[in-house]
Image: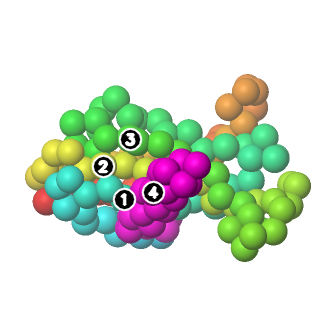
Amino acid sequence: SIKLILCLLLLLNVCICEDAKQVRTFEQSDGESGINVRLGEEFALKMKSNPSTGYSWKFLNQEETKDSVEFLRQRFENPSAVLGRPPLIGAGGYTYYHFKAVGVTNEPVSLKFSYARHFSNLLKAPVTSVYKINVN
C-alpha cells in the first residue's frame, strides 16, 4: 500500500508539472499587429466567448495553415471555476486555442476564426477574428 501511495504521488506530480508548463497566451488584440513565435513553441490564443448563448468560435483554415502552425486543442475556461468556485451557469469566459509552431514562415500566416451559431442558418454574418502569426 505504501508503494501504491508513492506511485500515485509520483503520477500526481507528473500531471501537475505538465499543467504548469508555461504557454504564452495572446489576446485578440495581439493578433491584429502580428504575433512572433519560435519554431517548436507551443502558444495559445485567448478569445472571449459564451457557449451558453449558442455561439462558439470555429477555426476556419486549419488545413491551409498546418505546415506552419499545428492545431493541438481547444478548451473553454469559466472565470469562476478558475477561482475555485462552481462555474456560473450562463456566464461567459474564454476559449483557448492551443497551437505549436512547426514551420518557419517568410510571410505571416493568418489564423482565421468565426464566432457564430454554427448549427443554424442565420442571415446575420458571424463575428470574425484573424491572428497573424510569424514563426522564426
Checking the image for residue 93, the label placed there is none
What kind of element bears circle 4?
helix
Q: Amino acid at mark 4?
A: Leu
Task: Please tell me which of labels 1 and 3 falls first in the chain.
Answer: 1
Q: Quadrant of residue 44?
A: bottom left
Q: Are marks 2 and 3 in contact (CB under 8 Å)?
A: no
In the image, which residues are magenta?
1-28
What kind of element bears circle 1?
strand
Q: Amino acid at mark 1?
A: Phe
**Mark 4 sits on what residue?**
10
| Residue 48 percent across, percent down from the top left | 64, 61
Measured in 3D between alpha carbons, the distance from the residue under mark 1 to the one under mark 3, in whole angstroms, is: 10 Å
In this view of the protein, which residue sits in the foreground, 33 or 9?
9
Residue plotted at (16% across, 45% down): 103
Residue plotted at (15% across, 50% down): 105
Task: Please tell me which of labels 1 and 4 falls first in the chain.
Answer: 4
Measured in 3D between alpha carbons, the distance from the residue under mark 2 to the one under mark 4, in whole angstroms, is: 27 Å
Is the residue marked by circle 2 packed among few (<14), some (14-19), or many (20+) residues within 10 Å?
A: many
**Mark 2 sits on what residue?**
100
Colour logic: rainbow
Is the residue marked by circle 4 packed among few (<14), some (14-19), or many (20+) residues within 10 Å?
A: few
In this view of the protein, which residue sits in the foreground, 10 or 111?
10
**Mark 1 sits on what residue?**
43
